[in-house]
Image: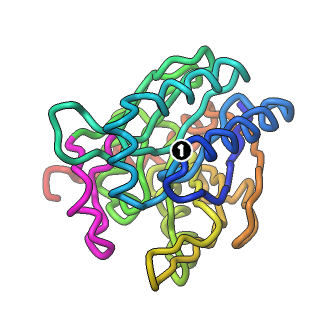
Amino acid sequence: MRVAIAQIDVAQGEFEQNLLSVESHAKNARLHGAEMVVFPEMFLCGFNYKKNVEFLRANGTFAEEKLCEIAQRNNICICGSIPHLNDTDALPTNRFLFISADGKILSTYDKIHLFSVFSENKYVKSGDEIVVANTPFGKIGFAVCYDIRFPDLFVRMAKRGAKLIIISSAFPHPRSEHWRILSRARAIENQCFVVAVNRAGTENFGKNSVKYFGMSAVIDPWGTVLAEAPQDLESLTFADINLDEVDAIRSKIPAFQDRREDIY
């Protein structure tokens, strides 16, 4: 399968503007043979929580419906996280979507680990379910940004059969080395492919701003970086992966068989 990693900047709070960007990248990805395009965390709106909730309350599932239309129109799977608000909840979740090429939401995952350093836990409702989805490509697990620092989550996904784990992120400077090391570690220790997509650009928060460094990557089960996007710049980067390689690698080093769950 060919995967496209869409390392994009995001216009804060501007859902419709960002949908135009998604359409352009999805079309370009499909023209280059990609079967799936993966976007960063909160790729339709950024982190203006107040403005995001106002949009969701006024427009419901408009954004999700438009993403499904884009996926179907371009015959490509679309993945990434956006805010999602249920009618009964006061706070939205940070929801990862896996949208199939025929325009259906095949699976969702609500971010479990919220980044308290930036007060995400005050504005977002945490998820409580690990998700590994049956997709046309095989079993895929999902994670969002801060989740990458919690290896137990990834072990659980691998034990449930995930051969690929997608991480949709918004990692800022100065933690680029954390990002690179943790992304490769999650692939190596779980003997699976990792598609780790980070955003680019600068986001303003009043007097403060955050600069995202990009450096999205596709990593194989040995920890080899198959493709890496540039630092700080928007880009569309491609990688070809064969999920059948996972079984071969796990048979050579049977780490999961050798785990001592009885004493952990």
- Which quadrant would the C terminus be assigned to in this image? bottom left
- Which quadrant would the N terminus be assigned to in this image? top right
The residue that appears at 52% across and 54% down in the rendered structure is: 187
Q: Is residue 92 above or below residue 8?
A: above
- Does residue 239 appear in the picture of this structure? yes
Range shown magenta: 110-128
The image position of residue 140, as x and y in percent, is 48, 34
Closer-to-camera residue (105/210): 210
Could you tell me the amino acid type at mark 1? Answer: Phe
Q: Is residue 113 magenta?
A: yes
Residue with the mark numbered 1: 15
Closer-to-camera residue (229/90): 90
Q: Is residue 150 left or right of residue 128?
A: right
Q: Residues within 10 Å of mark 1 (few under 14, many from 20)?
A: many
Q: Is residue 15 above or below residue 73?
A: below
**Which of the 4 quarters of the picture holds residue 29?**
top right
Q: Is residue 39 magenta?
A: no
The image position of residue 202, as x and y in percent, is 60, 72
Q: Is residue 159 left or right of residue 98?
A: left
Closer-to-camera residue (9/13): 13
The image position of residue 53, as x and y in percent, is 33, 48
The residue that appears at 40% across and 32% down in the rendered structure is: 59
The image position of residue 149, as x and y in percent, is 37, 66
- Does residue 159 appear in the picture of this structure? no
